[in-house]
Image (cartoon, rainbow, N blue to C red):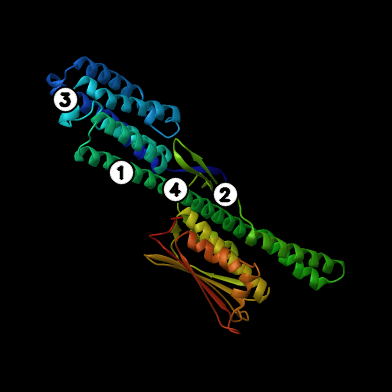
Protein backbone atom coordinates (compact mmCIF):
# COMPACT_ATOMS: atom_id res chain seq x y z
CA UNK A 1 0.00 0.00 0.00
CA UNK A 2 1.25 3.50 -0.77
CA UNK A 3 1.98 5.91 2.03
CA UNK A 4 1.17 9.57 2.14
CA UNK A 5 2.00 12.29 4.61
CA UNK A 6 -0.87 14.43 5.82
CA UNK A 7 0.25 17.78 7.23
CA UNK A 8 -1.93 19.40 9.83
CA UNK A 9 -1.04 23.01 10.60
CA UNK A 10 -2.31 24.60 13.76
CA UNK A 11 -1.53 28.22 14.61
CA UNK A 12 -3.51 30.66 16.69
CA UNK A 13 -0.85 33.30 16.04
CA UNK A 14 -1.25 33.72 12.31
CA UNK A 15 -4.65 35.46 12.57
CA UNK A 16 -3.18 37.79 15.21
CA UNK A 17 -0.26 38.74 12.96
CA UNK A 18 -2.65 39.38 10.07
CA UNK A 19 -4.80 41.58 12.30
CA UNK A 20 -1.71 43.48 13.48
CA UNK A 21 -0.65 44.07 9.87
CA UNK A 22 -4.02 45.60 9.05
CA UNK A 23 -4.05 47.58 12.31
CA UNK A 24 -0.70 49.23 11.58
CA UNK A 25 -1.73 50.27 8.08
CA UNK A 26 -5.10 51.65 9.17
CA UNK A 27 -3.72 53.54 12.18
CA UNK A 28 -0.99 55.07 10.03
CA UNK A 29 -3.69 56.46 7.74
CA UNK A 30 -5.61 57.62 10.80
CA UNK A 31 -2.58 59.52 12.16
CA UNK A 32 -2.16 61.31 8.81
CA UNK A 33 -5.84 62.26 8.68
CA UNK A 34 -5.73 63.63 12.23
CA UNK A 35 -2.84 65.88 11.25
CA UNK A 36 -4.55 67.05 8.03
CA UNK A 37 -7.69 67.96 9.97
CA UNK A 38 -5.74 70.02 12.54
CA UNK A 39 -2.75 71.18 10.49
CA UNK A 40 -3.56 74.86 11.04
CA UNK A 41 -3.11 74.42 14.80
CA UNK A 42 0.50 73.27 14.51
CA UNK A 43 3.19 75.90 15.17
CA UNK A 44 5.78 73.83 13.29
CA UNK A 45 3.81 71.73 10.80
CA UNK A 46 6.98 70.76 8.95
CA UNK A 47 8.05 68.66 11.95
CA UNK A 48 4.76 66.76 11.84
CA UNK A 49 4.95 66.40 8.05
CA UNK A 50 8.48 65.00 8.21
CA UNK A 51 7.68 62.55 10.97
CA UNK A 52 4.39 61.35 9.44
CA UNK A 53 6.05 60.93 6.03
CA UNK A 54 8.69 58.75 7.63
CA UNK A 55 6.01 56.88 9.60
CA UNK A 56 4.07 56.11 6.41
CA UNK A 57 7.15 54.81 4.61
CA UNK A 58 8.24 52.81 7.66
CA UNK A 59 4.81 51.26 8.12
CA UNK A 60 4.43 50.17 4.51
CA UNK A 61 8.01 48.94 4.23
CA UNK A 62 7.80 46.84 7.38
CA UNK A 63 4.45 45.15 6.76
CA UNK A 64 6.26 41.87 5.92
CA UNK A 65 8.01 42.13 9.29
CA UNK A 66 4.74 41.74 11.14
CA UNK A 67 3.44 38.91 8.95
CA UNK A 68 4.67 36.17 11.31
CA UNK A 69 6.77 35.55 14.38
CA UNK A 70 9.88 34.53 12.45
CA UNK A 71 10.02 37.77 10.47
CA UNK A 72 9.34 39.92 13.53
CA UNK A 73 12.85 39.94 15.01
CA UNK A 74 13.97 41.56 18.25
CA UNK A 75 15.96 44.17 16.35
CA UNK A 76 12.85 45.17 14.41
CA UNK A 77 10.79 45.42 17.60
CA UNK A 78 13.38 47.73 19.18
CA UNK A 79 13.53 50.01 16.13
CA UNK A 80 9.75 50.01 15.74
CA UNK A 81 9.18 50.98 19.36
CA UNK A 82 11.83 53.68 19.00
CA UNK A 83 9.89 55.13 16.07
CA UNK A 84 6.73 55.26 18.21
CA UNK A 85 8.52 56.82 21.20
CA UNK A 86 10.21 59.40 18.94
CA UNK A 87 6.84 60.45 17.57
CA UNK A 88 5.48 60.92 21.08
CA UNK A 89 8.44 63.03 22.14
CA UNK A 90 8.31 65.15 18.92
CA UNK A 91 4.68 66.12 19.51
CA UNK A 92 5.45 69.20 21.72
CA UNK A 93 8.03 70.35 19.20
CA UNK A 94 5.46 70.32 16.38
CA UNK A 95 2.66 71.80 18.52
CA UNK A 96 3.48 73.93 21.58
CA UNK A 97 -0.10 73.70 22.81
CA UNK A 98 -0.25 69.87 22.69
CA UNK A 99 0.67 69.61 26.37
CA UNK A 100 -1.94 72.17 27.46
CA UNK A 101 -4.77 70.89 25.24
CA UNK A 102 -4.17 67.21 26.01
CA UNK A 103 -4.49 66.43 22.30
CA UNK A 104 -3.31 63.33 20.48
CA UNK A 105 0.36 62.65 19.88
CA UNK A 106 1.77 62.50 16.35
CA UNK A 107 1.57 58.68 16.01
CA UNK A 108 -1.74 58.61 17.94
CA UNK A 109 -2.99 55.01 18.34
CA UNK A 110 -0.33 53.67 15.92
CA UNK A 111 1.86 53.33 19.00
CA UNK A 112 -0.35 50.55 20.32
CA UNK A 113 0.64 48.46 17.27
CA UNK A 114 4.26 48.45 18.39
CA UNK A 115 3.26 47.31 21.85
CA UNK A 116 0.98 44.60 20.46
CA UNK A 117 3.86 43.27 18.35
CA UNK A 118 5.82 42.78 21.57
CA UNK A 119 2.84 41.00 23.13
CA UNK A 120 2.33 38.57 20.25
CA UNK A 121 6.03 37.88 19.83
CA UNK A 122 7.13 37.50 23.44
CA UNK A 123 4.08 37.23 25.67
CA UNK A 124 2.95 39.31 28.60
CA UNK A 125 6.44 40.12 29.94
CA UNK A 126 7.55 41.70 26.69
CA UNK A 127 4.21 43.52 26.47
CA UNK A 128 4.65 44.90 29.98
CA UNK A 129 8.13 46.17 29.11
CA UNK A 130 7.05 47.93 25.90
CA UNK A 131 3.87 49.43 27.35
CA UNK A 132 5.82 50.75 30.34
CA UNK A 133 8.20 52.63 28.04
CA UNK A 134 5.22 54.07 26.14
CA UNK A 135 3.63 55.12 29.43
CA UNK A 136 6.81 56.92 30.55
CA UNK A 137 7.11 58.69 27.18
CA UNK A 138 3.50 59.89 27.34
CA UNK A 139 3.90 61.20 30.87
CA UNK A 140 7.11 63.06 29.94
CA UNK A 141 5.47 64.47 26.81
CA UNK A 142 2.51 65.83 28.77
CA UNK A 143 4.63 67.34 31.53
CA UNK A 144 1.64 67.44 33.87
CA UNK A 145 -0.46 64.46 32.76
CA UNK A 146 -4.20 64.73 33.10
CA UNK A 147 -6.58 62.05 34.27
CA UNK A 148 -7.38 61.13 30.65
CA UNK A 149 -3.68 60.64 29.89
CA UNK A 150 -3.21 58.34 32.88
CA UNK A 151 -6.38 56.47 31.93
CA UNK A 152 -5.15 55.88 28.37
CA UNK A 153 -1.70 54.82 29.54
CA UNK A 154 -3.17 52.34 32.02
CA UNK A 155 -5.56 50.97 29.39
CA UNK A 156 -2.73 50.25 26.93
CA UNK A 157 -0.63 48.70 29.69
CA UNK A 158 -3.38 46.33 30.93
CA UNK A 159 -4.65 45.43 27.44
CA UNK A 160 -1.20 44.59 26.07
CA UNK A 161 -0.31 42.42 29.06
CA UNK A 162 -3.65 40.61 28.80
CA UNK A 163 -3.13 39.93 25.09
CA UNK A 164 0.40 38.68 25.76
CA UNK A 165 -0.87 36.31 28.42
CA UNK A 166 -3.60 34.98 26.12
CA UNK A 167 -0.99 34.34 23.41
CA UNK A 168 1.14 32.33 25.84
CA UNK A 169 -1.85 30.22 26.91
CA UNK A 170 -2.82 29.65 23.26
CA UNK A 171 0.71 28.49 22.44
CA UNK A 172 0.65 26.00 25.31
CA UNK A 173 -2.74 24.68 24.18
CA UNK A 174 -1.46 24.41 20.63
CA UNK A 175 1.48 22.28 21.74
CA UNK A 176 -0.81 20.06 23.82
CA UNK A 177 -3.16 19.52 20.89
CA UNK A 178 -0.26 18.72 18.57
CA UNK A 179 1.03 16.15 21.04
CA UNK A 180 -2.45 14.61 21.35
CA UNK A 181 -2.70 14.27 17.57
CA UNK A 182 0.74 12.68 17.49
CA UNK A 183 -0.26 10.10 20.09
CA UNK A 184 -3.56 9.39 18.35
CA UNK A 185 -1.86 8.86 14.99
CA UNK A 186 0.77 6.58 16.52
CA UNK A 187 -1.90 4.57 18.33
CA UNK A 188 -3.99 4.11 15.19
CA UNK A 189 -0.92 2.97 13.24
CA UNK A 190 0.00 0.55 16.01
CA UNK A 191 -3.51 -0.91 16.01
CA UNK A 192 -3.45 -1.30 12.23
CA UNK A 193 -0.14 -3.14 12.33
CA UNK A 194 -1.33 -5.23 15.26
CA UNK A 195 -4.39 -6.35 13.30
CA UNK A 196 -2.27 -7.27 10.29
CA UNK A 197 0.22 -9.17 12.44
CA UNK A 198 -2.55 -10.97 14.28
CA UNK A 199 -4.18 -12.03 11.00
CA UNK A 200 -0.92 -13.42 9.61
CA UNK A 201 2.20 -13.97 11.69
CA UNK A 202 0.57 -14.69 15.05
CA UNK A 203 -1.86 -17.15 13.51
CA UNK A 204 0.99 -19.04 11.84
CA UNK A 205 3.04 -19.16 15.04
CA UNK A 206 0.02 -20.43 16.99
CA UNK A 207 -0.58 -23.14 14.38
CA UNK A 208 3.08 -24.22 14.47
CA UNK A 209 2.91 -24.43 18.26
CA UNK A 210 -0.24 -26.61 18.20
CA UNK A 211 0.95 -28.91 15.42
CA UNK A 212 4.42 -29.24 16.90
CA UNK A 213 3.05 -30.20 20.30
CA UNK A 214 0.73 -32.77 18.70
CA UNK A 215 3.48 -34.36 16.59
CA UNK A 216 6.03 -34.47 19.40
CA UNK A 217 9.77 -35.08 19.16
CA UNK A 218 11.81 -32.37 17.50
CA UNK A 219 8.61 -30.79 16.24
CA UNK A 220 7.56 -30.24 19.86
CA UNK A 221 10.71 -28.17 20.46
CA UNK A 222 9.95 -26.18 17.33
CA UNK A 223 6.41 -25.65 18.60
CA UNK A 224 7.73 -24.47 21.96
CA UNK A 225 10.01 -21.93 20.29
CA UNK A 226 7.16 -20.74 18.10
CA UNK A 227 5.05 -20.29 21.23
CA UNK A 228 7.76 -18.19 22.87
CA UNK A 229 8.04 -16.01 19.78
CA UNK A 230 4.27 -15.61 19.70
CA UNK A 231 4.24 -14.36 23.29
CA UNK A 232 7.14 -11.97 22.61
CA UNK A 233 5.50 -10.61 19.46
CA UNK A 234 2.15 -10.12 21.21
CA UNK A 235 3.90 -8.20 23.98
CA UNK A 236 5.68 -6.00 21.44
CA UNK A 237 2.47 -5.30 19.53
CA UNK A 238 0.54 -4.50 22.70
CA UNK A 239 3.13 -2.20 24.26
CA UNK A 240 5.24 -0.70 21.49
CA UNK A 241 4.43 2.60 19.85
CA UNK A 242 4.79 3.00 16.12
CA UNK A 243 6.10 6.41 15.06
CA UNK A 244 3.10 7.22 12.90
CA UNK A 245 3.55 10.96 13.12
CA UNK A 246 5.92 13.64 14.18
CA UNK A 247 5.38 17.10 15.60
CA UNK A 248 7.48 20.16 14.88
CA UNK A 249 7.11 23.84 15.61
CA UNK A 250 7.55 26.45 12.94
CA UNK A 251 7.35 30.07 14.02
CA UNK A 252 5.90 31.03 10.66
CA UNK A 253 3.06 28.50 10.71
CA UNK A 254 2.66 27.33 14.30
CA UNK A 255 2.70 23.73 15.41
CA UNK A 256 2.82 21.27 12.53
CA UNK A 257 1.80 17.64 12.82
CA UNK A 258 2.93 15.38 10.01
CA UNK A 259 0.89 12.22 10.11
CA UNK A 260 1.96 9.27 7.99
CA UNK A 261 -1.12 7.48 6.85
CA UNK A 262 -1.90 4.49 4.69
CA UNK A 263 -3.21 5.70 1.38
CA UNK A 264 -6.01 3.89 -0.38
CA UNK A 265 -5.23 2.16 -3.63
CA UNK A 266 -5.72 4.87 -6.26
CA UNK A 267 -6.53 2.63 -9.19
CA UNK A 268 -10.10 1.60 -8.35
CA UNK A 269 -12.35 2.99 -5.62
CA UNK A 270 -15.61 1.53 -6.86
CA UNK A 271 -17.90 -0.24 -4.34
CA UNK A 272 -17.17 -3.88 -3.59
CA UNK A 273 -19.60 -6.77 -3.32
CA UNK A 274 -19.16 -8.15 0.17
CA UNK A 275 -20.30 -11.57 -1.01
CA UNK A 276 -17.25 -12.01 -3.27
CA UNK A 277 -14.91 -11.20 -0.39
CA UNK A 278 -16.58 -13.71 1.92
CA UNK A 279 -17.00 -16.49 -0.66
CA UNK A 280 -13.46 -17.97 -0.16
CA UNK A 281 -14.37 -18.80 3.46
CA UNK A 282 -17.15 -21.17 2.44
CA UNK A 283 -16.29 -24.86 2.69
CA UNK A 284 -17.16 -28.14 4.32
CA UNK A 285 -16.87 -26.63 7.79
CA UNK A 286 -18.12 -23.13 7.00
CA UNK A 287 -21.59 -22.41 5.62
CA UNK A 288 -22.15 -19.06 3.94
CA UNK A 289 -25.69 -17.69 3.67
CA UNK A 290 -25.98 -14.51 1.64
CA UNK A 291 -28.59 -12.44 -0.23
CA UNK A 292 -29.27 -13.08 -3.88
CA UNK A 293 -28.36 -9.51 -4.83
CA UNK A 294 -24.90 -7.89 -4.49
CA UNK A 295 -24.11 -6.38 -1.09
CA UNK A 296 -22.28 -3.26 -2.21
CA UNK A 297 -20.13 -1.33 0.24
CA UNK A 298 -17.33 1.21 -0.18
CA UNK A 299 -14.06 -0.56 -0.85
CA UNK A 300 -12.36 0.23 2.52
CA UNK A 301 -15.48 -0.78 4.44
CA UNK A 302 -15.93 -4.05 2.57
CA UNK A 303 -12.28 -5.00 3.06
CA UNK A 304 -12.29 -4.25 6.78
CA UNK A 305 -15.57 -6.07 7.33
CA UNK A 306 -14.30 -9.13 5.45
CA UNK A 307 -11.07 -9.05 7.48
CA UNK A 308 -13.09 -8.96 10.72
CA UNK A 309 -15.05 -12.02 9.55
CA UNK A 310 -11.76 -13.76 8.75
CA UNK A 311 -10.49 -12.97 12.25
CA UNK A 312 -13.68 -14.38 13.78
CA UNK A 313 -13.25 -17.62 11.79
CA UNK A 314 -9.62 -17.84 12.89
CA UNK A 315 -10.82 -17.67 16.48
CA UNK A 316 -13.27 -20.50 15.76
CA UNK A 317 -10.52 -22.73 14.36
CA UNK A 318 -8.18 -21.88 17.17
CA UNK A 319 -10.48 -22.18 20.16
CA UNK A 320 -13.20 -24.56 18.91
CA UNK A 321 -10.91 -26.86 16.95
CA UNK A 322 -10.52 -27.76 13.29
CA UNK A 323 -13.66 -29.91 13.40
CA UNK A 324 -15.94 -27.10 14.59
CA UNK A 325 -18.76 -26.04 12.32
CA UNK A 326 -19.24 -22.35 11.55
CA UNK A 327 -21.98 -20.39 9.82
CA UNK A 328 -21.77 -16.96 8.18
CA UNK A 329 -25.03 -15.05 7.67
CA UNK A 330 -25.04 -11.85 5.60
CA UNK A 331 -28.04 -9.54 5.95
CA UNK A 332 -28.42 -6.51 3.68
CA UNK A 333 -30.83 -3.94 5.13
CA UNK A 334 -31.55 -0.45 3.75
CA UNK A 335 -29.81 1.27 6.67
CA UNK A 336 -27.15 -1.26 7.63
CA UNK A 337 -25.31 -4.46 6.75
CA UNK A 338 -25.16 -7.21 9.37
CA UNK A 339 -22.77 -10.15 9.23
CA UNK A 340 -23.14 -12.87 11.86
CA UNK A 341 -20.51 -15.54 12.48
CA UNK A 342 -21.66 -18.45 14.65
CA UNK A 343 -19.98 -21.71 15.66
CA UNK A 344 -20.91 -24.86 17.58
CA UNK A 345 -17.80 -24.90 19.74
CA UNK A 346 -17.56 -25.03 23.53
CA UNK A 347 -18.08 -21.26 23.89
CA UNK A 348 -15.96 -18.76 25.78
CA UNK A 349 -15.80 -19.03 29.59
CA UNK A 350 -16.89 -15.93 31.48
CA UNK A 351 -14.04 -13.49 31.99
CA UNK A 352 -11.82 -15.18 29.40
CA UNK A 353 -11.86 -12.22 26.98
CA UNK A 354 -10.69 -9.78 29.65
CA UNK A 355 -8.00 -12.23 30.68
CA UNK A 356 -6.83 -12.68 27.09
CA UNK A 357 -6.65 -8.94 26.56
CA UNK A 358 -4.58 -8.62 29.71
CA UNK A 359 -2.18 -11.24 28.36
CA UNK A 360 -1.77 -9.30 25.12
CA UNK A 361 -4.03 -11.52 23.01
CA UNK A 362 -5.81 -8.80 21.06
CA UNK A 363 -7.69 -10.81 18.43
CA UNK A 364 -11.21 -9.77 19.43
CA UNK A 365 -10.19 -6.28 20.57
CA UNK A 366 -8.22 -5.25 17.49
CA UNK A 367 -8.94 -7.62 14.62
CA UNK A 368 -12.69 -7.51 15.14
CA UNK A 369 -13.86 -4.64 17.30
CA UNK A 370 -11.04 -2.34 16.21
CA UNK A 371 -11.81 -2.84 12.55
CA UNK A 372 -15.52 -2.22 13.02
CA UNK A 373 -14.88 0.89 15.08
CA UNK A 374 -12.66 2.33 12.35
CA UNK A 375 -15.45 2.05 9.76
CA UNK A 376 -18.17 3.37 12.05
CA UNK A 377 -19.65 -0.02 12.94
CA UNK A 378 -20.05 -2.19 16.02
CA UNK A 379 -19.15 -5.73 16.98
CA UNK A 380 -21.07 -7.71 19.58
CA UNK A 381 -19.89 -11.07 20.89
CA UNK A 382 -22.31 -13.49 22.57
CA UNK A 383 -21.02 -16.72 24.00
CA UNK A 384 -22.61 -19.32 26.27
CA UNK A 385 -20.35 -22.09 27.61
CA UNK A 386 -21.23 -25.33 25.86
CA UNK A 387 -23.42 -23.64 23.24
CA UNK A 388 -20.91 -21.97 20.94
CA UNK A 389 -20.11 -18.36 20.16
CA UNK A 390 -21.82 -15.76 17.99
CA UNK A 391 -20.21 -12.58 16.66
CA UNK A 392 -22.52 -9.95 15.16
CA UNK A 393 -20.92 -7.27 13.00
CA UNK A 394 -23.00 -4.22 12.08
CA UNK A 395 -22.06 -1.42 9.65
CA UNK A 396 -24.53 1.46 9.22
CA UNK A 397 -24.70 2.48 5.60
CA UNK A 398 -24.67 6.16 6.50
CA UNK A 399 -21.29 5.75 8.19
CA UNK A 400 -19.78 3.08 6.01
CA UNK A 401 -16.44 4.14 4.75
CA UNK A 402 -15.91 6.96 7.24
CA UNK A 403 -12.57 6.48 8.88
223 relative to 111, above or below: below
Dot label at residue 159: 1
Q: Which residue is mark 4?
A: 174
Disc 4 + disc 2, Cβ < 8 Å:
no
* Among numbered discs 3 and 2, the one appearing first in the sequence: 3
Tag in front: 4 or 2 = 4
Q: Residues within 10 Å of mark 4 (few under 14, many from 20)?
A: some
Q: Residues within 10 Å of mark 2 (few under 14, many from 20)?
A: many
Q: Residue furthest top?
A: 46
Residue 63 is situated, as x and y percent measured from the top left of the image, at 35, 27
Residue 167 is situated, as x and y percent measured from the top left of the image, at 39, 44
Disc 2 + disc 1, Cβ < 8 Å:
no
Residue 236 is situated, as x and y percent measured from the top left of the image, at 67, 59
Disc 1 + disc 3, Cβ < 8 Å:
no
Dot label at residue 244: 2
Q: Please state if 58 lies on the left or on the right of 214 as rendered.
A: left
Tag in front: 1 or 3 = 3
For the residues labelled 4 and 3, the Cα–Cα distance comes to: 49 Å
For the residues labelled 1 and 3, the Cα–Cα distance comes to: 29 Å
Instruction: Give the residue at x 38% y 60%.
Output: 398
* Among numbered discs 1 and 4, the one appearing first in the sequence: 1
Tag in front: 1 or 4 = 1
Circle 1 sits in a helix, a strand or a loop, which is it? helix
Q: Please state if 212 lies on the left or on the right of 298 as rendered.
A: right
Q: Looking at this view, is 34 or 332 the one in front? A: 34
Q: Residues within 10 Å of mark 3 (few under 14, many from 20)?
A: some
* Among numbered discs 2 and 1, the one appearing first in the sequence: 1
* Among numbered discs 1 and 3, the one appearing first in the sequence: 3
Whether residue 267 is visible to the viewer of this picture, yes or no, is no
Q: Please state if 359 lies on the left or on the right of 64 as rendered.
A: right
Q: Looking at this view, is 381 or 14 the one in front? A: 14
For the residues labelled 2 and 1, the Cα–Cα distance comes to: 42 Å
Amino acid sequence: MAKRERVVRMSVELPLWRALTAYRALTMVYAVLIFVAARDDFERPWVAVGYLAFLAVWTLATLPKVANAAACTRRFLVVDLTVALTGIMLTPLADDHAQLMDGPTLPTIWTAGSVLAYAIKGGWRWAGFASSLVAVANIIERGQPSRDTLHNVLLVWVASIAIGYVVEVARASERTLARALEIEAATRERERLARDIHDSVLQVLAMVQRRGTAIGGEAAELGRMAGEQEVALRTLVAGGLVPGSRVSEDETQGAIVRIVEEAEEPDDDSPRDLRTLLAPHAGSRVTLSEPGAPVLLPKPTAKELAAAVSAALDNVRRHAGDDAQAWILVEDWPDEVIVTVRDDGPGIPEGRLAQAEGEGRLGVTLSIRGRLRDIGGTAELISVPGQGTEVELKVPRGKAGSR
